[in-house]
């Protein structure tokens, strides 16, 4: 008998046997879920399936060391782990496969994510935090491979902060003095992504409790390791990170995916060192198989050799565990057969229950709709057609809501010529149907909690006599924020010692310590990931990206992860991280960009704030810190040395999001702009005023949300002309503003002239003062274009200039 098959000292052999058989049952159930799941897809009951077969035993071992308060940030293979740790069930797994939109039945995403995208609910029904330390926690998965890495770093960082900052020890719902591990999982091939390396390096630099498992099956879909990984061995490549006498590093373990005893031992050692020493750990689990191939999209016979397929059968972890159980006399053949049969049965039952629950709700809705059209038919309205629609719908064994939608629209077309009174029941149903399904499929793009940013009350600034450089306003704001709330911390390139390149945090590291005002390596993607993960654990990070031009490196995690988090968990998770950067109006291709169109289209689900000066920026930070929502704040790079009055209620004043400021009144045109362009617009307005043209200038302040009360159209009603001034490329953010004002606010009705956009050139801005002059919109150009617009309206008053 193998030594590892003996019970640990504290357990009787019988208890140990029970535990091992329980694990075997769990592995078999998970395998059955994979087999049956694939069948459901191939028979058309679900659209796509990706499963965790082949990784069952390793995940059961990992689940044994995953304690309450711990976190997972992983990928689509982890069903066994989720079942074993009680964070999901087989029935919920199938509910997700069928895309059941009910969060009671499919709590991970309310049917919004493909199967295998796991999450636990971190929020109550109102969107408030639930406790995290009395339960296991799983951050919501995303599909881009390695996309789980930046978030993972932040989840691990939170433990370090909760451990080392004594002021945080009271937050026991979130952490028990940082005792929690952040567990990551990744496939072998996805370690080819740059963010994997960036994250592992950062974890070693920072020394955070991050336990990374690599499920190494030798492939990434069809592409074998030799095309993915140098030397085909990720832990060997990472061996330079191994902890040694020089300090800082991580522990690295290797274990086979079919070796139950070895896996249990390895995970115990790995978790102990990670938890106690707060050292990152890597566990490479090799010789992992994928019995059904990558996903339901293809068959692995196409790319795996006969020998490999045979080897996979022999080294299937469940087959190996079965052999081990019998060889070590922990179970008889009959006992393991019985467990396997029972697993098949229980998984079949769970799948049926999930399918029935999913379909019965839809069938109920089908019946409700049919009642309405049948009643109308009984009154002689479209009798034959409605009977046919009703019969067609009710005969479907697997109806979808789309079928109801199609039938409803057909019914509306059939009743087009009827009066409202006659078709009122149909119109009422249409409204209810849209409302219900809007909630099912489009709710929670933003927080719907009492702490949403739009609910933060406005407190106007009160100014004293003191006038200071802009950066001092910002610094006073951050100082006050850090003073009042120990959960606030800030980090980024050059943020620590020198207090950022423009001194927004100068002196604050000395005051609040290195843990709270921290320098980071040059790694934008994972800096933002740190903010994301830490904010999910109740902290209030301000993650800084040095310049707006470098935000593109971080845009991936903002777009895929932060912006989608509330939505993809249907209000189950949130990440109130603030991303701070500065941009607009410097000079040069990579120091003056303003790709705001790119950004606002990529991050719907976040707020994007573009304050024109540092006082507005401070008010926006205060609003955001009182809210539970993620946001990007773009400060004006050329504003730090401009004098501003210092508010004396720095700790309290707020700037409401989505509410524009009118900077100047005028009756000839409404000029909508933001950020650094505000000053240029004012300059141009002075020039225009000399010619009797009075332009109303509106600073939107936030692009997302955009003018929630439709103030701009009110101005347009008076001026009847719209000018949008923007530093982005033509058709960039200016196109968004046009869509909002003309379409959303109905502004087209009030236009007497064609709408005008004044933007930068389509290329990136050239360097130097002249480069700026000829690349970006300036006062001369604004004057010329607005004057020309007025000339076209009244050539007598404003004769042609050219
Ligand atoms: C960024 C990104 N690129 C490509 C894909 C498509 N894709 C999905 S899974 C996969 C292979 C991943 O292989 P590996 O990391 O080894 O995990 P395994 O599926 O083998 O467990 C690919 C290329 C993706 N989801 N995300
Ligand atoms: Mg793989």
Image (cartoon, grey):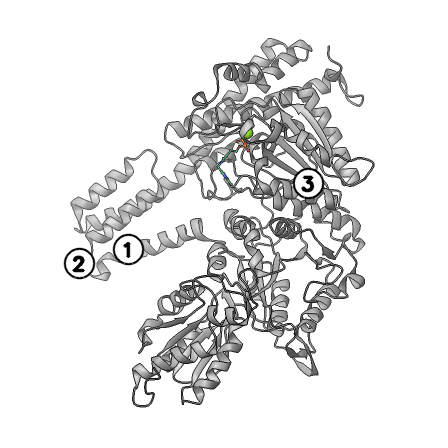
The quadrant in which residue 631 appears is bottom right
Cα distance between the residues tagged 1 and 3 = 51 Å
Decide: is 244 above or below 171: above
Answer with mark 2 or mark 3, whichever residue precedes in sequence.
Answer: 3
Seen at 28% across and 49% down, the residue is 408
**Circle 1 residue:** 425
Please state which of the two labelled residues, at mark 2 or mark 3, is closer to the viewer.
Answer: 3
Give ligand 2's quarter of the image: top right
**In the rendering, at what x and y percent does residue 760 appear?**
45, 67
Please state which of the two labelled residues, at mark 1 or mark 3, is closer to the viewer.
Answer: 3
Residue 70, disc: 3
Quarter holding the C terminus?
bottom left
Which residue is nearer to you in this view: 722 or 74?
722
Q: Is residue 263 left or right of residue 801?
A: right
For label 2, the SS is loop
The quadrant in which residue 710 appears is bottom left
Please state which of the two labelled residues, at mark 2 or mark 1, is closer to the viewer.
Answer: 2
For label 3, the SS is loop
Q: Are marks 2 and 3 in contact (CB under 8 Å)?
A: no
Q: Is residue 404 left or right of residue 66?
A: left
For label 1, the SS is helix
Decide: is 629 above or below 302: below
Decide: is 483 above or below 682: above
Answer with mark 2 or mark 1, whichever residue precedes in sequence.
Answer: 2
**Circle 2 residue:** 417
**In the rendering, at what x and y percent does residue 45 appear?**
38, 32
**In the rendering, at what x and y percent does residue 506 appear?**
74, 66
């Amino acid at each position: 008998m193998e030594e590892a098959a003996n019970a640990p000292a504290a357990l009787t052999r019988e208890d140990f046997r029970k535990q091992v058989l329980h694990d075997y049952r769990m592995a078999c159930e998970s395998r059955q879920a994979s087999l049956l799941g694939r069948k459901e897809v191939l028979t058309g009951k679900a659209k796509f399936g990706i499963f965790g077969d082949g990784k069952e035993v390793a995940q059961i071992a990992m689940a044994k060391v995953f304690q309450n308060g711990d976190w997972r940030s992983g990928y689509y293979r982890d069903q066994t782990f989720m079942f074993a740790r009680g964070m999901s069930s087989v029935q919920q797994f199938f509910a997700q496969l069928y895309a059941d939109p009910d969060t009671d039945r499919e709590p991970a995403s309310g049917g919004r994510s493909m199967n295998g995208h796991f999450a636990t609910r971190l929020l109550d029904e109102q969107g408030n935090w639930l406790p995290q330390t009395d339960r296991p926690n799983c951050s919501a998965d995303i599909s881009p491979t390695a996309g789980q890495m930046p978030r993972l770093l932040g989840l691990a960082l939170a433990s370090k902060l909760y451990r080392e900052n004594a002021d945080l020890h009271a937050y026991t719902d979130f952490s028990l003095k940082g005792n929690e591990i952040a567990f990551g999982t990744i496939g072998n091939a996805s370690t080819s992504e740059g963010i994997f390396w960036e994250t592992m390096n950062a974890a070693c630099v920072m020394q955070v409790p991050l336990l990374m498992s690599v499920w190494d099956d030798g492939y990434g879909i069809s592409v074998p390791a030799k095309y993915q990984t140098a030397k085909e061995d990720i832990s060997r490549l990472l061996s330079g990170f191994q902890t040694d006498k020089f300090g800082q590093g991580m522990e690295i373990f290797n274990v086979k995916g079919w070796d139950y005893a070895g896996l249990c031992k390895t995970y115990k050692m790995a978790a102990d060192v990670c938890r106690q020493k707060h050292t990152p750990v890597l566990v490479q689990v090799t010789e992992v198989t994928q019995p059904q191939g990558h996903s339901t999209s293809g068959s692995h016979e196409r790319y795996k050799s006969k020998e490999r397929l045979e080897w996979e059968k022999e080294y299937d972890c469940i087959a190996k565990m079965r052999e081990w159980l019998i060889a070590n006399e922990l179970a008889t053949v009959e006992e393991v057969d019985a467990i396997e049969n029972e697993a098949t049965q229980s998984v079949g039952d769970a799948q049926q229950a999930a399918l029935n629950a999913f379909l019965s709700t839809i069938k109920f809705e089908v019946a409700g709709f049919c009642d309405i059209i049948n009643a109308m038919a009984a009154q002689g309205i479209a009798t034959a057609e409605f009977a046919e629609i009703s019969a067609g719908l009710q005969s479907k064994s697997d109806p979808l809501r789309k079928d109801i939608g199609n039938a409803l629209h057909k019914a509306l077309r059939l009743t087009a010529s009827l009066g409202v009174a006659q078709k009122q029941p149909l119109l009422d149903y249409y409204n209810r149907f849209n409302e219900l399904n809007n909630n099912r499929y489009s709710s929670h793009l933003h927080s719907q909690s009492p702490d949403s940013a739009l609910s933060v009350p406005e407190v106007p600034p009160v100014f004293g006599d003191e006038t200071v450089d802009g950066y001092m306003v910002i610094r006073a704001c951050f100082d006050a924020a850090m003073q009042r709330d120990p959960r606030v911390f800030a980090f980024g390139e050059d943020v620590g010692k020198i207090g950022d390149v423009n001194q927004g945090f100068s002196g604050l590291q000395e005051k609040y310590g290195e843990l709270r005002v921290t320098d980071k390596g040059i790694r934008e993607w994972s800096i933002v990931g740190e903010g994301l993960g830490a904010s999910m654990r109740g902290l209030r990070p301000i993650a800084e990206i040095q310049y707006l031009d470098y935000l593109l490196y971080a845009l991936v995690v903002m777009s895929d992860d932060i912006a989608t988090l509330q939505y993809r968990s249907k209000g189950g998770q949130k990440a109130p991280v603030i991303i701070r950067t500065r941009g607009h109006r410097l000079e040069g291709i990579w120091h003056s960009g303003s790709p705001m169109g790119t950004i606002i289209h990529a991050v719907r689900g976040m707020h994007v704030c573009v304050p024109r000066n540092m006082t507005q920026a401070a008010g926006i930070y205060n609003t955001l810190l009182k809210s539970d929502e993620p946001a990007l704040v773009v400060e004006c790079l050329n504003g730090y040395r401009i004098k501003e009055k210092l508010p004396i209620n720095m700790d309290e004043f707020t700037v409401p999001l989505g509410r524009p400021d009118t900077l100047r009144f005028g009756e000839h045109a409404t000029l909508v702009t933001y950020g650094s362009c505000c000053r240029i617009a004012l300059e141009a307005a002075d020039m225009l005023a000399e010619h009797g043209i009075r332009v109303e200038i509106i600073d939107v302040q936030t692009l997302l949300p955009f003018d929630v009360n439709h103030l701009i159209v009110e101005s347009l009603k008076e001026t009847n002309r719209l000018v949008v001034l923007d530093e982005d490329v033509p058709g960039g953010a200016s196109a968004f503003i046009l869509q909002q004002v003309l379409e959303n606010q109905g502004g087209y009705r009030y236009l007497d002239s064609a709408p005008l956009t004044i933007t930068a050139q389509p290329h990136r801005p050239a360097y130097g003062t002249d480069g700026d002059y000829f690349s970006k919109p300036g006062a001369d150009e604004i004057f010329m274009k607005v004057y020309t617009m007025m000339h076209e309206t009244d050539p007598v008053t404003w004769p042609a200039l050219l």
